[in-house]
Amino acid sequence: MKLTKAEKIWLAAVIIIYACYNLPFVPPYGHARATLIHALITLVPLWIAVYVGLVRVCRIYRLRDPQEAGSDTSTAAQTPSDEEDTSC
């Protein structure tokens, strides 16, 4: 499977923001204001990057409608056949 340009950009953005989120000792322990600033700078952009990228990729790869795919193969895989031996 080949990655599209949108997927590569999405992956790069998420990795860079996640790396910034996991910097050691940032924010300093015990400082509420630094924690809020750190969350606004890293956590919120991480959520935005993940969800915006997810929407863009889902537009590229649409899910198939089960009615269009054909009901013969989906129902056969879900129901056991009558020929199976159930005796013990």
Image (tube, rainbow, N blue to C red):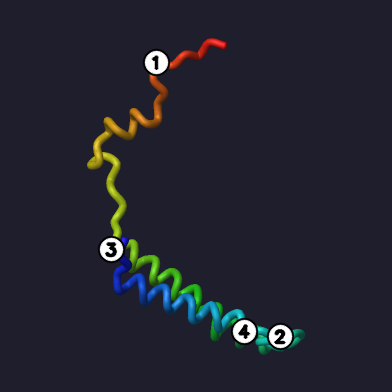
Whichever of callouts 1 and 2 sits on the residue coming sooner in the sequence is: 2
**For mark 2, what is the residue?**
32
Q: Are marks 1 and 2 in contact (CB under 8 Å)?
A: no
The amino acid on which the numbered mark 1 sits, given as a three-letter code, is Asp
Name the disc covering residue 74, or none: none
The amino acid on which the numbered mark 4 sits, given as a three-letter code, is Leu
**In this view, 58 is above or below 5:** above
Disc 4 crowd, CA 10 A, few/some/many (<14, 14-19, 20+): few
Whichever of callouts 3 and 2 sits on the residue coming sooner in the sequence is: 2
Q: CA distance from mark 3 to mark 2?
A: 41 Å
Disc 2 crowd, CA 10 A, few/some/many (<14, 14-19, 20+): few
Q: Are marks 1 and 3 in contact (CB under 8 Å)?
A: no
Name the disc covering residue 60, or none: 3
Q: Decide which of 30, 12 is in the foreground and name it.
A: 12
Looking at the rendered structure, the secondary structure element under dot 4 is: loop
Picture coordinates of residue 33, whole percent (x, y): 68, 88
Looking at the rendered structure, the secondary structure element under dot 3 is: helix
Residue at figure coordinates x 45%, y 71% from the top left:
50
Check the picture and name the quadrant holding the N terminus: bottom left
**In this view, 1 is above or below 65:** below
Residue at figure coordinates x 40%, y 26% from the top left:
79
Name the disc covering residue 82, or none: 1
Q: Nearer the viewer, mark 3 or mark 4?
A: 4
Check the picture and name the quadrant holding the C terminus: top right
**For mark 4, what is the residue?**
23
The amino acid on which the numbered mark 3 sits, given as a three-letter code, is Ile
Q: CA distance from mark 2 to mark 4?
A: 17 Å
Picture coordinates of residue 31, whole percent (x, y): 73, 87
Q: CA distance from mark 1 to mark 2?
A: 65 Å
Whichever of callouts 2 and 4 sits on the residue coming sooner in the sequence is: 4
Residue at figure coordinates x 49%, y 81% from the top left:
16
Whichever of callouts 1 and 3 sits on the residue coming sooner in the sequence is: 3
